[in-house]
Image (spheres, rainbow, N blue to C red):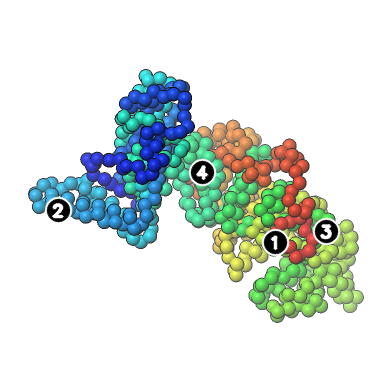
Amino acid sequence: MKPRILTQRKNAPVVPRAPDRPDEALADDTGTGLGPSALEVTARSLLLPGGVCSSFAVAGYPREVGAGWLEPLLTYPGRLDVSLHIEPVPPLVAAQRLRRQLARLEASSRANAEAGRLADFGAEAAADDAADLAASLARGHGRLFRLGLYLTVHAGNAEELTAEVERVRALCASLLLDAQPTTFRALQGWATTLPLGVDSLRMRRAFDTAALAAAFPFTSPDLQPALGDTPVLYGLNAHSSGVVLWDRFALDNHNSVTIARSGAGKSYLTKLELLRSLYQGVQIAVIDPEDEYRRLAGAVGGTRIALGAAGVCFNPFDLPAGDHDPETLIRRALFVQTLIATMLGEPLTPMARAVLDRCVVAAYAAAGITNDPRTWKRQPPLLTDLVGQLTLAGEGGSKDAEELAARLEPYVTGSYRGLFSGPTTTRPDGHLLVFALRDLPEEMRPVGMLLALDAIWRQVSNPHHRRRRLVVVDEAWTLMQQEAGARFLYRLAKSARKHWTGLAVVTQDAADLLSSDLGRAVIANAATQILLRQAPQVVEAVADAFDLTDGERTFLLAARQGEGLLCGTAGGSDRAAFLAIASQAEHDLVTTTPAEVNALEAIPEPGPSGANTSSDSAEEGDRS
C-alpha cells in the first residue's frame, strides 16, 4: 500500500495559525535578520539586488504518493528553492485531533444522508484516511507530523519570473500539488524558504511517517532497493540529485562482484562500503594482497595481521576459543594435512597422509590436548613439534615420515621459518579483520592465503556466533590463481547466504571471472553487481555477460573515476548509474592515490607505529 497523506475537504479553507513564540512573530514582521541590503516588496514578488523571486505554499496534495515523489521539484533545471518544515505531533494530541476529525466527518455524512443529499465522496475519502491513520497510530506503526511545503522561484527579471512561475506551477500540477502564491505575504514566503528553520506561513498538512519518509529523495528512479536494517550509501545518482542506497543483506543472497579497470576507483568504493557497513554493526574480514587497508584498520580499531612481516607468527594448530564441538580437533587435524600438502606443492600419497595424521594427533597429545574440550585451553603444538613427531616416526622405520620431516625443514629451521616460528602473535578476531599479504614471498603466498582463508571460514561457519558478516576479497585475480583460494571462493559464493554472510569479490581482470567456470559461478551467485570504468579491450565481453545496453556500454567506457553502474539483482533488471562520494575524513582513510597517501603518512598516526588497535588482541603478544 502506498503512503497516504491525510485528506482534507477540498473546499476547507487553510487558515494560518498565530505564532506560538515571539521569534516567530518577529519573523512575520521582518522575515529574517540576515539578508540583502534592500528589498522591494510587492503583492506577489520580491525585487532583490540580483534578481526577483516569488514564493508559493503547497495547499493541496495527492491522496497517495510514491517513494521520492518530490524528486521532480528537486531536479528542476531552474533556480527553485524547496523548503520542508516538519513538526512532530505528540501521540496523545494526534489521537485527540483524529478523533475530533472523525466525529466531524461522520456527522457531516449523517447530515447529508438525513437531508437526502448525495454522498460527499471527498468527505468519505477523508474519513477512510483518518480511520486508517488512527489505527496505525494506535498500533504504534507510525507517528503524525505537520508538514509545510514551500517553494521560491528565482529569475533575473519580472518577465523571466512570470515564465518560470508558470513552468513550476505546471510541474506541481503534474504532481497533483496545488501551489498557491503567498499573496501579500511575499516577504514571509521568501524568509520561510531560507535555511533558517522559521516557518512564517504555517500552512501545513498532516502526514504520517510513511508519507513523510516518501517525501525525501532517498531512492533512485532507476533502482528499486530492498532496504533492510543495514542500508549503505553508495553515492549520488549520476542522472539526478537523488542518492543511491543499497542493502545487500535485504536481497536473496548477500554476495557482490565489482569489476573495473585499474585506477577506476574499485578499491575506493569497496573501502567506503566497508566503512559504512561497520557503522551498521556488520563484522568484516578482508583479504588484502596489497596492504591497502592498513590506515582504515588502524582508524577503526580493526585487527591487521601482516602475514610474512618480521615478528608475525600464525600457528595453524590453534583451536578456536569457546568451541566445544567434539569434531573440532578432527577438523583441525584434517586442515593441517591440507596445509602440509600446500607447503609441499603436491598431493600427499595415502601412506604419507596416514603417517601425517598419526603424527598430528601425537603432537596434540604431547601438548596435553585430547578430544576433551577442557584440554583445548592448553598451549597448542607448533609446526616444530609436528616435525619432531615425524622425525621420531622416521627413526622407527617409516620412510614416509622421514621424507615428510626432511621436506618440512625449510618451514622450521630454513628460509620460511618466520611464519611458523612461534605461537600466534595476533588473534584473528574483531569487528574488522584484515589479512595483509604484501610481505609474503611468492613461494609462501599459497600457504599464507590458505591460513587466512581458514581463519575467515572458521568465523563464518561458527553456528554459535551468527551475525551479519562480509568477506571482502580485493584483487581477487591473485586469489584465483591459487587452487586453495579458488576453491574457497567457490565454496563461499555458494554457501555464504546460509551463514548470514556476504562475499564481495573485487577484481580488475574481468577475463579471469568471465573465462572460467569458477568466475561465472561467482557472478551468477552475486545479487549485487557493480561495474566501473572498463577498458575497451574487455568491454564487449562485459557487455555480453551483464546484458548491457549500448548506452550503458558507452557510459562505462567514458566513466570518470568513481562513476559506475549498480545492477541490483542477479539478473540485472534494476540498475542505476552513480558517483561514489565520501566525506573528507572518509577520503583520507580510503584513498590510494600515491601523492595523497605520502602526504597522509607523513602525519604520525595515533598509537604505537605499526600496532593494531584491536582491544581483543591486546594481550596476545606482538602485533603487526
Residue bearing mark 1: 615
Spatial distance from mark 2 to mark 3, Cα to Cα?
A: 86 Å
Residue position marked by numbered label 3 in the rendering: 311
Instruction: Give the CA distance from mark 4 to mark 2.
Output: 49 Å
**Marks 4/1: CA–CA distance:** 34 Å
Task: Tell me the mark number nearer the camera, choosing from 4 and 1.
Answer: 1
Relative to 463, 190 lies left or right: left
Residue drawn at the location 84% of the way across and 64% of the way down:
421
Q: Is residue 35 left or right of residue 600?
A: left
Upstream in sequence: badge 1 or badge 2: 2
Q: Which residue is the site of mark 4?
A: 244
Residue 609 x, y percent position in the rendering: 78, 52
Mark 1: few/some/many CA within 10 Å (<14, 14-19, 20+): few
Amino acid type assigned to the residue bearing label 2 in the image: Arg
Task: Please tell me whether mark 4 sits on a helix, a strand or a loop.
Answer: strand
Q: Which residue is mark 2?
A: 110
From the image, state whether disc 4 or disc 2 is nearer to you. 2
Q: Specify the quadrant of the image occupied by residue 467.
A: bottom right
Instruction: For marks 3 and 1, give the one nearer the viewer.
Output: 1
607 and 431: which is toward the camera: 607
